[in-house]
Amino acid sequence: MTLKITNLTGGYSAIPVLEQVSFTVKPGELTGLIGLNGAGKSTTIKHIIGLMQPFSGEIQIESQTLKENPEAYRRSFAFVPETPVLYEELTLREHIEITAMAYELPKEEAMTAALRFVKAFRLEDKMEWFPAYFSKGMKQKVMLVCAFMIDAPVYIIDEPFLGLDPLAIRTFQEIVKEKKAQGAAILMSTHVLSAAERDCDNFVVLHKGQVNVTGTLRDLQAALEMPGASLDELYLQLTEAGMPL
Ligand SMILES: Nc1ncnc2c1ncn2[C@@H]1O[C@H](COP(=O)(O)OP(=O)(O)OP(=O)(O)O)[C@@H](O)[C@H]1O
């Protein structure tokens, strides 16, 4: 499924934070959402997942909107927040069970699917643990397990790299590759540009609530007339210039 954002204007009060934001995340592609602190990445994500309502513009997942078809819209994506949000009174196993229930997945199949990711993130001996005993990275892994077990057509992943150890990052990258191969459309916000450059098929650069530039690394290099430049160099150039192209 395709995630399509068209002329999204939105924010927290009457003054919009986002202005006319448009971009598309296609099936089988990982799109990196990058921008300085305060550029509007989280605000964009909050609009996509339905925590905030656009002032104007449209967000569609395969032509479904949250307004017109809230159930179908909500079921078509999985969201992994930067700060893990877990139920303190539920074990890891129960988190998996409640995710299966929320998405109406058959219990045993869902558990089998989840266990693959539990093992990949080396949590198999923690199935009966409560979140209070998990480190921040472990909590993040639980969120990732609960998202990946769903087989969602669209994934929204907010800054995955900061809390994970290098082994977990590698596991995350392998799973993302697998999800892409299965046709998932993935939007990932991050400040870790080296990882974004390596993993992402294309980029959306947000600056002061507007899309500064979108496209592949080559598109960005061409737009800025910086052939061979790294994402880091392009990004600095874009944000220092601070001007829409
Ligand atoms: N709850 C809020 N109420 C009012 N304004 C907010 C709120 N949250 C964020 N903002 C403002 O919206 C703008 C965009 O913030 P946002 O959190 O989307 O940035 P970001 O790109 O995700 O930044 P970061 O990289 O620091 O996470 C900023 O000017 C910020 O001050």
Image: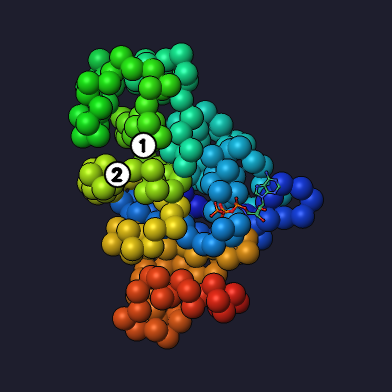
The residue that mark 1 highlights is 137
Q: Position of residue 114 (x, y in %)?
A: 27, 26
Residue 165 disc label = 2
Q: Few, some or many C-alpha atoms within 10 Å of disc 2 (few <14, some 14-19, many ≥20)?
A: few
Element at label 1:
helix
Q: Earlier in the sequence, mark 1 or mark 2?
A: 1
Q: Residue at x 57, y 79 (%)?
A: 241
Asked whether the viewer can see residue 60, the reply is: yes
- Amino acid found under the numbered disc labelled 2: Asp
Q: Taking 144 as reference, is 176 above or below it?
A: below
Quarter where residue 118 is shown:
top left
Q: Taking 12 as reference, is 51 above or below it?
A: above
Q: From mark 1 to mark 2, how far is it between C-alphas? A: 7 Å
Q: Position of residue 226 (x, y in %)?
A: 39, 84
Q: Few, some or many C-alpha atoms within 10 Å of disc 1 (few <14, some 14-19, many ≥20)?
A: some
Q: Residue at x 30, y 14 (%)?
A: 128
- Amino acid found under the numbered disc labelled 1: Gly
Q: Are marks 1 and 2 in contact (CB under 8 Å)?
A: yes
